[in-house]
Image (cartoon, rainbow, N blue to C red):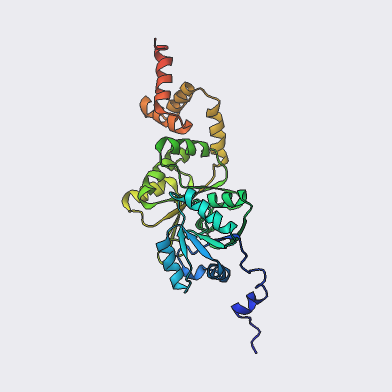
Amino acid sequence: MSSIKSRDDMVHGTEEKNRIEASTLYLVATPIGNLADLSTRALKVLSGVDFIAAEDTRNSAKLLTVFGIRKPLVSYFEHNKRARGEEIIERLEAGESAALITDAGTPAISDPGEDLVRLCAQHGIRVVSVPGCCAAVTALTLSALPTGRFVFEGFLPMQKSDRRKRLSKLQSEERTMIFYEAPHKLQATLDDFLSFFGEDRRISLCRELTKRNEETMRTTVGDAVRYYRDNAPRGEYVLIVEGCPEADLQAGEAWAEMTVTDHVAAYLSEHPDIKKLDAIKAVAKIRGVPRNDVYRAVLEQENGPSE
């Protein structure tokens, strides 16, 4: 008789622990590409709860059909989360059990699931996480960048001014940084990285994780910018960016002690071949402030305050 245990044998002793409980919300991680990544426990929970809340019920219905799971689906996404969240809470308080899933990966990470978890906490409703795939952690392990300390930034703000503020704060971040990005925005985001993080900052670009066309590019920000000028981005991306090197951090501390005008003068001294206006633009990006503010400060130093 074989001594190798079957998958069913290995989970047999955990049936009591994995029993579906009433008035409980289960956060169930789903595959980010490869359907074989859905765990035995996730299948048990999805099959056993009273209903499933999904980011996109059409996508989720396809996933559930593959595994022969038939459960009532309710939509829960960014634009209906307030009203639908209250409805889900009422059902949970009445004794039903529910699973929350997102289109791919772990719910409540960079999606409205965090609001539903907060509601459950406010109402004293039990929440159980059924762990599994997470694109951020998967990409981090593939990046060949430091993994001991990292910060998850998700999607950057859409408004240009808000993006600049966020990236300005991250210029001196020493931990490895994780970002999500859509293909049609990738080039603009890389251009922003070039402005705030510099040419030589290491970056890992992961796309189509666990899928047939999975790819990880380990390079620098400058080389990534040049590559995607000639190659159209395809698929959803996870960007892993090296934290600020010690040398850059020390340089940043140096300009932090300067006035804006002294910073422009120092930049011109280090780059004698560029125009003053280009130096003003560069200093504005480095400091994360509006270009007009830097221009006005330089003008006032040269001509005196305007009346």
The one of 177 and 254 positioned closer to us in this rendering: 177
Q: Position of residue 124 (x, y in %)?
A: 64, 52
Q: Is residue 158 left or right of residue 24?
A: left
Q: Is residue 103 among what the camera can see? A: no
Q: Position of residue 256 (x, y in %)?
A: 54, 28
Outermost front residue = 94
Please tell me which residue is depicted at 57% across the width and 45% down the height of the picture. Answer: 175
The number of numbered badges drawn on the structure is 0
Q: Which residue occupies 31% across, 51% down?
A: 230
Vertical comparison of 215 with 180: above or below: below
Q: Is residue 228 above or below residue 286?
A: below
Q: Quarter of the image holding residue 198?
A: top left
Q: Position of residue 238 (x, y in %)?
A: 46, 53
Observer-nearest of 48 and 37 = 48
Please identify the quadrant where the N terminus is shown.
bottom right
- Between 67 and 297, the residue placed more toward the observer is 67
Where residue 205 appears, x then y in whole percent?
45, 53
User: Which of the 4 quarters of the picture holds residue 13?
Assistant: bottom right
Residue beneath the point at 39% across and 48% down: 186
**Who is closer to the viewer here, 144 or 89?**
89
Asked whether residue 17 is in view, the answer is yes
Q: What residue is drawn where x is 56% and y is 31%?
A: 253
